[in-house]
């Protein structure tokens, strides 16, 4: 069992704020929103007409050009969640300078990419084809396009990574659990390098209709950019988003030996189950608190060292309350001194990709000394009045260590701890 520090040496992002870590971060801390009217399909019959869509390069210089990621021929074989994952992987691996051509290094590289749903649009399109045109008209690539593990599979094929491969499918905690699983693979000695995170792209009439039926989504259709409002008294649900966030993990020793730059240390990981409800956590936040407590113990981190929490807070009444109840259990009277923000206010909820993207945001907060804001938090709910929610605007801060939370349907909770990396 290896006990030396594990660091991030590369990061990649595809989000509703654009593509590329630096561009997305600049937009995030400047208070921009990636939530827009949903023009991807006809929303006339849907109660929700807004979403966090990844911008197209044709309309945004920092948008995504799928042709730069996969060829037109290959695009027919994969769902868009795999394209997002491949784009994020390309950026993360390039920054880490980890593109090995020797078999041994490739066999010691793991690929762990979580997702909440996988290729959902491919599934719904296949159902339409089956009903209207018959089974013979289905593409032979339907199944490999929608399978949840095919983002990880396509990445490993493209780069020849023959080490461990995996796909946590744990709803909205999947991306963060993938990074935690990657840490464990390095700790156990099964891998030297892990590409880990999450990808999801299920903005589809069925998913929007289903979440709306569960009364989980905001219906603030007349004002997309103000719809996602975590902790605000007037929040009315989350906004569905899409994207991918991946990081390259390795030990500090391994990074130094090959001349890679350690960006931040990933010091701890904890996970738990609520064993409570299909979609809602307990209002006392007990499960969330267990995940945070386990994470801090693994990290051997004192709560007084935590200078920022990137909250899961999706902008639902029950979820935001439960998470803060859990944070109170851990931080007690110190909670008022710990800045807490929800970056979902700018990009919406990316489901299985959320943890991967928000882990990158947490790392950037530590690296830059800037706290990303909670947009639209104009009037905090009465249970949050004593908190520093970094409302509306980003600000500078000395952050040596931080936590990132991700919770999902089924009662899954995950927390990741990071701290400044030893650059010596």
Image (spheres, grey):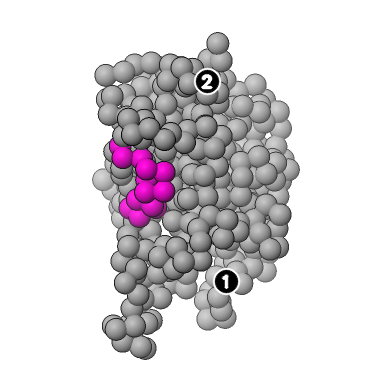
- Labelled disc at residue 40: 1
- Residue shown at 31%/87% (left/top)? 134
Judge left or right: residue 31 versus residue 249.
Answer: right
Residue occupying the far front of the picture: 102
Which residue is label 2 attached to? 259
Residue 205: x and y in percent read 47, 73
Residue 200 lies, with reference to residue 92, above or below; the image says: below
Q: Nearer the viewer, residue 332 or 216?
A: 216
Report the mark closest to the observer, 2 or 1.
2
Task: Kindly indicate the quadrant of the structure image that contains residue 182.
Answer: top left
Q: Which residues are magenta?
A: 149-163
Q: Nearer the viewer, residue 111 or 386?
A: 111
Residue occupying the far top of the picture: 424
Residue 52: x and y in percent read 58, 59
Residue 72 seen by the camera: yes
- Residue shown at 49%/17% (left/top)? 256
Give the SS element for disc 2. loop
* Quadrant in the picture for the N terminus: top left
Q: Main secondary structure of the magenta part?
A: helix
Mark found first going from the N terminus, 2 or 1: 1
């Amino acid at each position: 069992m290896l006990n030396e520090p594990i660091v991030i040496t590369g990061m990649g992002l595809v989000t509703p704020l654009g593509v590329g870590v630096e561009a997305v971060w600049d937009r995030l801390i400047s208070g921009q929103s990636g939530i827009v009217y949903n023009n991807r399909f006809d929303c006339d019959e849907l109660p929700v007409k807004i979403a966090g869509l990844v911008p197209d390069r044709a309309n945004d210089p920092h948008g995504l050009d799928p042709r730069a990621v996969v060829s037109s021929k290959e695009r027919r074989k994969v769902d868009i969640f795999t394209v997002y994952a491949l784009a994020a992987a390309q950026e993360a691996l390039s920054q880490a300078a980890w593109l090995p051509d020797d078999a041994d290094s490739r066999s010691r590289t793991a690929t762990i990419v979580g997702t909440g749903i996988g290729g959902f649009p491919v599934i719904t399109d296949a159902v339409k084809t089956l009903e209207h045109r018959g089974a013979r008209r289905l593409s032979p690539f339907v199944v490999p396009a929608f399978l949840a593990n095919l983002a990880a599979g396509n990445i490993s094929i493209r780069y020849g990574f023959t080490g461990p491969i995996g796909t946590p499918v744990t709803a909205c905690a999947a991306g963060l659990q993938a990074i935690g699983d990657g840490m464990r693979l390095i700790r156990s000695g099964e891998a030297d390098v892990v590409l880990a995170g999450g990808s999801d792209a299920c903005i589809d009439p069925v998913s929007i209709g289903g979440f709306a039926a569960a009364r989980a989504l905001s219906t603030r259709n007349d004002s997309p950019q103000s719809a996602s409002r975590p902790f605000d008294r007037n929040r009315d649900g989350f906004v569905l988003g899409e994207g991918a966030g991946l990081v390259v993990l390795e030990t500090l020793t391994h990074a130094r030996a090959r001349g890679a730059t350690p960006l931040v240390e990933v010091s701890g990981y904890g996970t738990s189950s609520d064993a409570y409800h299909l979609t809602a956590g307990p209002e006392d936040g007990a499960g969330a608190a267990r995940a945070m407590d386990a994470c801090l113990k693994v990290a051997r981190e004192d709560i007084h060292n935590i200078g920022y929490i990137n909250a899961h807070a999706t902008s639902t009444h029950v979820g935001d309350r439960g998470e803060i109840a859990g944070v109170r259990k851990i931080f007690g009277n110190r909670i008022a001194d710990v800045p807490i923000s929800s970056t979902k206010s700018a990009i919406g909820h990316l489901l299985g990709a959320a943890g991967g993207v928000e882990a990158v945001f947490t790392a950037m907060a530590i690296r830059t000394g800037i706290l990303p804001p909670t947009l639209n938090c104009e009037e905090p709910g009465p249970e949050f009045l004593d908190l520093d929610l970094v409302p509306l605007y980003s600000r500078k801060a000395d952050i040596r260590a931080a936590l990132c939370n991700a919770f999902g349907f089924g009662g899954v909770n995950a927390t990741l701890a990071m701290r400044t990396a030893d650059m010596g």
